[in-house]
């Protein structure tokens, strides 16, 4: 974008173009180095992930929902504790 803006203003961009080429080469080298490291470490990461115990996705509760049933009970004045 900077190069395009400078061209639109009529400013020479030859020095900028050489810097862009240098930067592109450095980015390419860094990407190749990253890919090489990733290729050596990815199998190790997969082995470690396989050794991790799975956490249950269900909510754990001390209540046995199979044996539990819902009962409707009348509301009475003697069930309220009004002690202060």
Image (cartoon, rainbow, N blue to C red):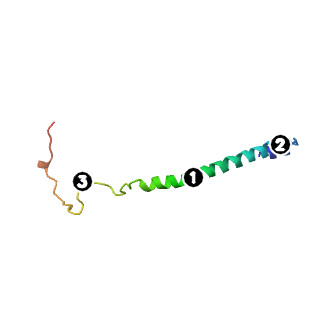
Circles 2 and 3: CB atoms closer than 8 Å:
no
Pick whichever of labels 2 and 3 is earlier in the sequence: 2
**The residue tagged with tag 3: helix, strand or loop?**
loop
| Residue at screen point 27% across, 54% down | 61
Is 78 situated above or below 84? below
Pick whichever of labels 3 and 1 is earlier in the sequence: 1
Q: Distance of mark 1 from mark 2, alpha carbons?
A: 43 Å
Q: Looking at the picture, how far across and down is residue 45, in whole percent?
A: 50, 52
Circles 3 and 1: CB atoms closer than 8 Å:
no
**The residue tagged with tag 1: helix, strand or loop?**
helix
Image disc number at residue 48 = none
| Residue at screen point 70% across, 47% down | 29
| Front: mark 3 or 1 | 1
Q: Looking at the picture, how far across and down is residue 19, in whole percent?
A: 79, 42
Question: Does residue 53 appear to the left or right of 68 in the view shown?
Answer: right
Pick whichever of labels 1 and 2 is earlier in the sequence: 2
- Name the foreground residue: 70 vs 62: 62
- Name the foreground residue: 66 vs 36: 36
The residue pinned by badge 1 equals: 40
**The residue tagged with tag 2: helix, strand or loop?**
helix
Q: Distance of mark 3 from mark 1, alpha carbons?
A: 45 Å
Question: Does residue 59 appear to the left or right of 70 in the view shown?
Answer: right
The residue pinned by badge 3 equals: 62
- Residue furthest toward the left? 78
Image disc number at residue 6 = 2
Estimate how packed mark 2 is, as few (under 14), some (14 to 19) or many (20 or more) residues with alpha carbons within 10 Å.
few
């Amino acid at each position: 974008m900077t190069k395009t803006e400078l061209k639109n203003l009529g400013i020479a961009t030859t020095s900028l173009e050489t810097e862009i080429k240098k930067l592109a080469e450095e980015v390419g080298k860094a990407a190749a180095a990253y890919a090489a490291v990733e290729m050596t470490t990815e199998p190790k990461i997969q082995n470690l992930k396989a050794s991790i115990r799975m956490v249950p996705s269900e909510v754990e509760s001390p209540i046995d929902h199979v044996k539990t049933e819902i009962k409707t009970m009348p509301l009475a004045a003697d069930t309220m504790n009004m002690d202060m």
